Amino acid sequence: MRLSRYFLPVLKETPSEAQIVSHRLMLRAGMIKQASAGIYSWLPLGYRVLRRIEQIVHEEQQRAGHIPLLMPTLQSAELWQESGRYDAYGPEMLRIRDRHDRDMLYGPTNEEMITDIFRSNVSSYKNLPLTLYHIQWKFRDEVRPRFGVMRGREFLMKDGYNFDLDYENAMIAYDRHMVSYLRTYERMGLKAIPMRADSGPIGGDDTHEFLVLADTGESEVFYDSAITDLRLGDRLVNYDDPAELRAICEEWTTPYARTDETHDETLYGEIPEDRRQTSRGIEVGQIFYFGTKYSEAMGAMVTTPDGARVPVHMGSHGIGVSRLLGAIIEASHDDRGIIWPEGVTPFHAGIVNLKQGDSATDAVCTELYAGLAAAGLSPLYDDREERAGAKFATMDLIGLPWRITAGPRGVAQGKVELTSRRTGESEEMSPAAAIAKVVELYKGIA
Ligand SMILES: Nc1ncnc2c1ncn2[C@@H]1O[C@H](COP(=O)(O)OP(=O)(O)OP(=O)(O)O)[C@@H](O)[C@H]1O
Ligand SMILES: [Mg+2]
């Protein structure tokens, strides 16, 4: 993409309505525009990041054997009356009436709809285990939408649902989700810690929330600092091996990590003092085993190998896809702007031409662009007639992890400069070497 032909409406001033840095930076970098309270248009740059995040979520879900489908945003009230949640849900649910006076709603979640799909099509243990998921817009009429996409009213969520014959199998699905989530967040350059969560008034169910540490998070968290050293790295995970999944989950759930809702002072006190940490966290996902709650209410039954009919065991598992943009920026920025992790960056590298119109420099920039594109990368070429300072400021604000700068002086010596957005370090090299280096940096990522 050439910046002169792109649509990147960056703001010079800091928008006054934004209280936290990720919201300010998303507005300043021209990523989103508020349409109404808690509802946003995704401008081209924001949309690119959103799609990359979605892509990672899809890849990791499918790697775990989960199957994508797509359910609608608008739902009929009938299914929710069957489960009893139509009355229970409260004012967060946006209720709509169509022209035939039928009660509809904009889905805040999809347990009822997926249970209906399941019961209409599956009746035997032979079709289990099964996990279906989608990435779809949700609406929750939050009392206080705030912090930009972090707490929106309309937001994009990955929600997945497992169907299993019994508790033991449902726990395998639970572990599979935990591991796939760990991989997902790690690919996004995030440290998201699974923390035992509150399962609500019923209790007894298993649930973990995934929290990204950030001062602006809405939850208070308490943890053993040992957990922040854990990393999956390039470990190969065999999702068909329940023992391996269990071992990974145990590794991540043994160190103490809880939110204020489940915090236990006694257990916390048992952590060696120098490892006791308290901080704030952003919830970027949650996994939840709820057993037969919906299958019993809605009659989603399966026959067992002995011919008995039992309600199917279920869980639901969510990732806050649109919230993740805010969480990533909260975790990765400086006073000049965003610093995208390589896994989610909207463009892989920026090319800055210090003297647009200088034919040798223009030629080198074109060569850099073509070389990166030929390797399957997406460069953003700042080919505008602008001062160097303004070009650097834009690149720093939008946060591309790598920048290649070409100017007449360097070009005369066959050199360009490769700069890391994160460290600010620069290195001079030939255009071919710069292309090769950037390609190398994205190996296994892009
Ligand atoms: N209003 C929202 N705006 C953006 N993302 C959201 C919002 N509500 C939930 N999410 C994201 O969707 C994920 C799954 O939804 P879940 O039902 O667990 O939300 P939740 O626990 O009600 O969230 P919260 O406690 O933040 O209100 C959450 O972990 C979060 O990342
Ligand atoms: Mg939650």
Image: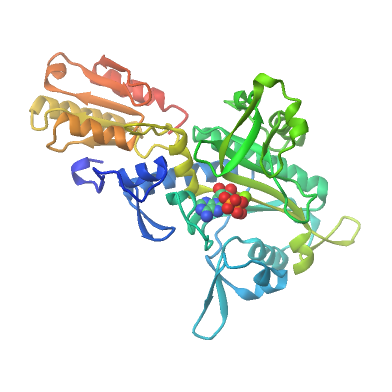
Q: Is residue 106 above or below residue 325?
A: below
What residue occupies the far bottom of the structure in this picture?
100
| Viewer-proximal residue among 71 and 355 | 355
Q: Give the x, y percent position of residue 328.
A: 46, 38
The part of the image, by quadrant, that contains residue 276 is: top right
Q: Is residue 434 left or right of residue 210?
A: left
Q: Residue 112's x, y, as percent?
A: 66, 65
- Which colouring convention does the figure follow? rainbow
Q: Which residue is most to the left?
A: 358
* Residue at screen point 23% across, 35% down: 381
59 vs 186: above or below = below
Residue 217 picture location, percent across and down: 53, 41
What is the residue that sits farthest to the right in this orientation? 306
What residue do we see at 40% from left, 24% from top? Answer: 441
User: Can the viewer see residue 378?
Assistant: no
Judge whether 191 appears above or below 71 on screen: above
Is 427 placed above or below 435 here?
above
Query: Which of these two is toward me, 220 or 33?
Result: 220
Give how far across and how far down residue 336 sits, in percent.
31, 32
Side of 30 where 192 appears, left or right = right
**Residue 20 seen in the current view:** yes
Q: Nearer the viewer, residue 30 or 256?
A: 256
In the picture, the quarter occupied by the N terminus is top left
What residue is rendered at 34% in x and 33% in y? 400
The total number of labels drawn is 0
**Which of the image's four quarters has the C terminus?**
top left
